[in-house]
Each structure stands twice: as C-alpha cells, then as structure tokens.
Amino acid sequence: MVRRCAAYRARQQVKTITSWNGPIMWNGIFDGKAYDELHIQLRSSVALTVFAVGRYLDAYYKDFLTSAEQHFMLGLPVTYYVFTDSPEKVPQIKLGPQRSLKVIKVKMYTRWQDISMMRMSMISDLIESEIASNFRYIFCFDVDQVFEARFGSEALGDSVALIHAGFYKAPKEEWSYDRNKKSTAFMETGDFYYHAAIFGGLCANVKNLTDACYLSIMEDKINDVEAVWHDESHLNKYFWLNKPSKLLPPEYCWNYGMGDKSNIKIVRLRWAPKHYDTLRTNV
Ligand code: 5GW
Ligand code: MN
C-alpha cells in the first residue's frame, strides 16, 4: 500500500520480504509519516496489553510505560491494559492526549512458567469482553523492555510477528523450536524464529492466535508435557501454520548483549536487563 515497492530494495543486506509476500519492516524501507497519515485517516486505534505480575511490576513497569509514552504509536488513540496482581502498587504515570490506561487484577501464579502461559487465555478473554469492540488493533508486549525510538503505525498490520534478535542470523538448524514430538508445539522446520515478547494485529486475528496457543498449551498439560520455550514455542507453531502478514525485524526488540549489530540501523525497543536469579523464584 504505502509506496513500498522500490523502497524494499533500500536494505540490501537483509531480507525485506517473506516468501509469502509479507513486508519485513527494516528501517529505511518505509515512510513512517505516510503510515501515520493513513492510520489517522482510517481512525485506527490500538490496545496494548502488558503483564506486570509479582516482582516484574517494580522491576520493569515504570521504564516500560514511560518510554512507551515517548515512542509507541504517537498520534493514534492508545489504551494500555496492565495485568497485575497488585493494582494498588501500579505507579501513576502521566499520559499524553488520546491515551488511557486500565488496570486488570490477576492472581499470582506460583509457577512462573504458568504466568507466561496464562497470558494467552487472559488476553483472549479481554479481547472478547472489551478490546474487539473498541479498538482495531491490539499489540501484546513483555514488560521487561524499554522503547528507545519510534515504534509507530508502520508496525500495524493484520497479523504481526517479531523476528527474534538472537536467531535472525543463525542457521535454521539452530532455531530453538520445540523438538519434542510429544508436544503440540513440535516443529521440524519453520520460516523464522519469532519472539513472543511482541505480537499483534487485528483483534480477530490475535483472538485466534491466543485461543490456539492456549488450547495447545492445555493439550500439552493434559499429556504432561511442557514446550521448551513455553508460550513462545506455541506461538512459533501458530505462525508456521498461519503466516503473519507483516514481520518486525529485531530493530523492534534488540538485545545489546547479543553481539553483531551490523544490520541494526535503529534500536526502537531494547531488552531490559534480566535478573532471573532474583525475579524468577518458584514458591
Ligand atoms: C517471572 C519469572 C519467570 C518467568 C516469567 C516471570 C514473570 C513474567 C513474572 O513474574 N511476572 C510477569 O509479569 N511476567 C510477564 O511475562 C512479564 O510481562 C514478562 O515480560 C513476561 C514474559 O516473561 P519474561 O520476560 O521473563 O520471559 P522472557 O522470554 O523474556 O525471558
Ligand atoms: Mn521478556
């Protein structure tokens, strides 16, 4: 749609289009202003979901939200949906015009693997009860990350997946799909290795994704298996069977600890430091 054909060749060193003709939004191949004009004209609205449960609220929430206010979908109506076990502890952050925030109370799961996996069913329920009737798009984020530059309307699409920073240069054989045949997330091969820290799209599509992932996770539980990377393994399987219409390159979720930055022209979002030793404690 937006002046894209010639621009696809602006980045010679990286793949800018998938085999099924979806754009991979490397910096330089698109005109952000044109996307903004289009989405303002279409009156696009965006819901952002984020979980900040247990120690993650204190550790990451403030930087995530403050930086989102600087960089996420500026110019469009945005509502944040914050899922937490401690609503009273959510710090107040001043929001820009056309932006609002709702806190949703969730229970604290005792196994951390469950927090990460239960997100799928909670997002699905909220899409149905509230988001689908009020927003065109939904984006679901991990909280342990910080925006550093524009993360704008160019990222909106029917079904949007993020290429994992750790694998975009690695050979396919090294991608960490679930190789356990007993899991519904089992994959022999795939198109890309996607990162579950960000996914999004039209509400109906994300509803379909979260439902499918939740059902597969539950089927695994019944069979007493857990996929190697939990919800991310199921997400990868879903996007293998249901191709995303648009891909975000690792410029949209970079990890400075990861070494080769040669293709990263701009870091729009970065991983926050992980302190698994203190944050991930199973009761
Ligand atoms: C805590 C320990 C281990 C795994 C997950 C958690 C955890 C995750 C938590 O205690 N509280 C919480 O809110 N989360 C949510 O799940 C956060 O939004 C977090 O960003 C997301 C995914 O968990 P991460 O970020 O630890 O997973 P990775 O894949 O980035 O390592
Ligand atoms: Mn994370």
Image (cartoon, rainbow, N blue to C red):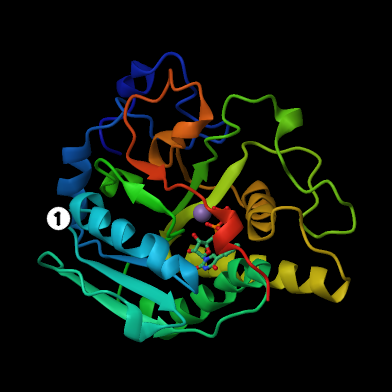
Question: Which of the two residues, 232 or 134, is positioned nearer the viewer here?
Answer: 232
Q: Is residue 243 visible?
A: yes
Give how far across and how far down residue 117 sits, in percent: 63, 68
Q: How many dots with numbers?
A: 1
Give how far across and how far down residue 44 sits, in percent: 24, 61
User: Could you tell me the amino acid type at mark 1?
Assistant: Gly
Q: Mark 1, residues whose alpha carbon is within 10 Å: few (<14), some, or many (≥20)?
A: some
Q: Residue at x 41, y 83 (%)?
A: 86
User: Residue 112 is drawn in which quadrant?
Assistant: bottom right
Q: Is mark 1 within 8 Å of ligand 1?
A: no
Question: Which of the two residues, 90 or 178, is positioned nearer the viewer here?
Answer: 90
Give how far across and how far down residue 167 sits, in percent: 60, 32
Q: Residue furthest front?
A: 278
- Quarter placement of the N terminus: top left
Q: Is residue 138 visible?
A: no
| Position of residue 116 in the picture relative to residue 221 (left or right) | left
| Position of residue 206 in the picture relative to residue 211 (left or right) | left
| Position of residue 37 in the picture relative to residue 20 (left or right) | left
- Quarter placement of the C terminus: bottom right
Does residue 54 lie above or below 72 as drawn?
A: below
- Residue located beneath label 1 in the image: 75
Does residue 170 lie above or below 205 as drawn?
A: above
Give the quadrant of ligand 1. bottom right
Q: Residue furthest top?
A: 12
User: Residue 110 is drawn in which quadrant?
Assistant: bottom right
Question: Which of the two residues, 181 or 5, is positioned nearer the viewer here?
Answer: 181
User: Residue 134 is drawn in which quadrant?
Assistant: bottom left
Q: Residue at x 22, y 43 (%)?
A: 35
Q: Residue at x 34, y 49 (%)?
A: 146
Q: Secondary structure at mark 1?
A: loop
